Image: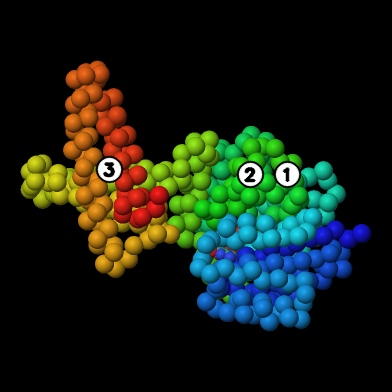
Amino acid sequence: MKSRVSIVLPTYNERGNIEPLLQQLLPLQHRYNLEILVVDDDSADGTAELVRQLAHAEPRLRLIRRVGRSGLASAIKEGLLDATGDLALVMDSDGQHEPASVQRALDTLLAGDLELVVGSRFHSEAEIVGLSGRRQRGSSWANAAARFSLPRPYSQLSDYMSGFFALRLEPLLPLIRAVDVNGFKFLYELLAVSQGRLRVTEVPLSFQPRSYGSSKLDLAIFWDFLISILHSLSLRVLPRRAISFGLVGFSGVAVQLLVTQLLMLAGFGFEQALPVAVVAAASSNYLINNALTFRFQRLTGLALLRGLVKFLLVASLPVLANVGLASAYYSLVAPDTLWAQLAGILVVFVWNYAASSRFVWNTP
Ligand code: GDD
Ligand code: MN
């Protein structure tokens, strides 16, 4: 009996790449009972239309088309939840993952008492042609951070960010359901929610250059990854958005110190420089939060300006409260300036986060 295998291919603007890939994957139907799911996020280049055409002649091919771009991890989750195979394999659709590795990954999964097989670009037998030196260095930092933040049993893995992996669907469905899709890295999240219980191994995966189109990895995706690591380290207790908001807050502190310094160098007094620096820091926080923390509710045009005014109003309230609170703590609880100030800052943070989520970006 052939094993039922579902291959999940996330696509975003891959019209030039998807057809050659499908041609290389379809011959696998001689070994497996095959189903191929393309999950497209409404690509502008006609990827979905092409797949739809191809599916007319190929019943093993299915198209899942989503309106609006919801991201790679979310596309993978959707494909896996819709897959009907006993095994599923996820890979990039741009030709960077060599189809030759598919059979090796699936057979490894079938042969062993395993639930997950990861295609690793950093395996000693793998060859990386398609990653720039900069991306490789970035990946090794990211890998080290991922290893540190994940449960110990996974420390022998070498590619936590891989977009290529095969798994047994039945036992893993509850975990797949639980994966938080606010990121690019589905595999990392899967490992994180599994709490070290998955039986997993790696196979080498050679990484090829792209033939058409360009990578969708951008700053926001890098940011999401950083948040994922901190979220894991907080034992998945702190909400992701709050972590992001907090990090942006730190950048605001730097802006405030810098602007104060510059203005004082230009001859202004501290009392004149400080208010300008505070407003500059708050505005920079606002813009960065709008671009990263709340990018799915991102404000633009006139709404961006209105949002800034609201944000400044929201943020100025606790500044006053903070002064009151810190001095109350100092006089009522303990004459300790450090803890008094930290308590004040915590209150300001919680207020700013809650109030601006609600009133500026209209999220609960
Ligand atoms: N549906 C959907 N929605 N697909 C997407 C989206 C999205 O928002 N963003 C990217 N994809 C698809 C691409 O079309 C491609 O098939 C695959 O996901 C990988 O995207 P690339 O943009 O080619 O990623 P990369 O080559 O820069 O990144 C590679 O390395 C990462 C780790 O460093 C990939 O292998 C990633 O999977 C991997 O996480
Ligand atoms: Mn790619």
Q: Residue at x 57, y 68 (%)?
A: 66
Q: Amino acid at mark 2?
A: Leu
Q: Is 202 placed left or right of 149 in the picture?
A: right
- Please state which of residues 185 and 310 is positioned toward the viewer in this rendering: 310
The residue that mark 2 highlights is: 191
For badge 1, the amino acid type reads Val
Q: Is residue 99 above or below residue 165?
A: below
State the quadrant of the N terminus: bottom right
Which residue appears at 77% of the width and 77% of the height? 58
Q: Which is more toward the observer, 6 or 103?
A: 6
Relative placement, left or right, of 245 versus 3 is: left
* Helix, strand or loop for disc 1: strand
In the image, 89 versus 306, the foreground residue is 306
Above or below, 211 against 202 in this view is below
The answer to which quarter of the image holds residue 14 is bottom right
C-alpha separation, residue under disc 1 versus residue under disc 3: 43 Å
- Tell me the element at label 2: helix
Residue at numbered disc 1: 200
Other residues around mark 3 within 10 Å, as few (<14) / some (14–19) / many (≥20): some
Q: Position of residue 353 (x, y in %)?
A: 34, 44
Which mark lies nearer to you, 3 or 2? 2
